[in-house]
Image: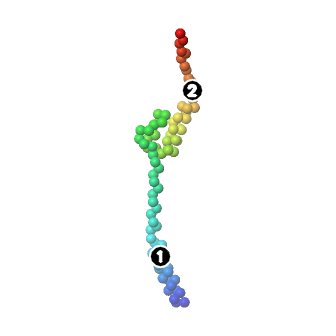
Amino acid sequence: MRLACVAILCALAAAVPAAGQDPQPQPQPAPEPTIQQGVKAGGVDLSGLTQDQAEALLTSSLQAPLAQDFVSARRASRSG
């Protein structure tokens, strides 16, 4: 019985330092790629934005102008 108690005590003593150790640091995820400086679409500057940010900005910036009616006028050609 005494031997069993000593064995249990040794096992617990060995487990305490292992539990107190810091876990292995997790690698940081790679940053999301961004659009290069100077890139514009429809007159909207997209420099430094992620794809999701650029999509949201273009949608909000161009939604109203694209919803308007488009009028096309053509000058008649002269014949003769």
Query: Which residue is label 2 attached to?
Result: 70
**What's the colour scheme?**
rainbow
Q: Amino acid at mark 2?
A: Phe
Determine the residue located farthest toward the top in the rendered image.
Answer: 80
Determine the residue located farthest toward the front in the rendered image.
Answer: 80
User: Which structural element holds mark 1?
Assistant: helix
From the viewer's perspective, tell me whether residue 17 is left or right of residue 75.
left
Query: Which residue is label 1 attached to?
Result: 16
Could you say which is closer to the camera, residue 15 or residue 75?
A: 75
Which residue lies at the image location 45% right of the left edge and 52% below the top edge?
31
Of tags 1 and 2, the one toward the viewer is 2
Query: Is 37 located above or below residue 10 in the figure?
Result: above
From the viewer's perspective, tell me whether residue 22 is left or right of residue 79.
left
Could you say which is closer to the camera, residue 12 or residue 73?
A: 73
Q: Amino acid at mark 1?
A: Val
**Circle 2 crowding by C-alpha within 10 Å: few under 14, some 14–19, many from 20:** few
Q: Position of residue 58 (x, y in %)?
A: 51, 38
Q: Position of residue 54 (x, y in %)?
A: 49, 42
Q: Position of residue 78 (x, y in %)?
A: 53, 12
User: Which structural element holds mark 2?
Assistant: loop
Q: Position of residue 14 (x, y in %)?
A: 47, 78
Which residue lies at the image location 52% right of the left edge and 35% below the top edge?
62
Which residue lies at the image location 47% right of the left edge and 50% below the top edge?
32
**Circle 1 crowding by C-alpha within 10 Å: few under 14, some 14–19, many from 20:** few
| Comes first in the chain, label 1 or label 2 | 1
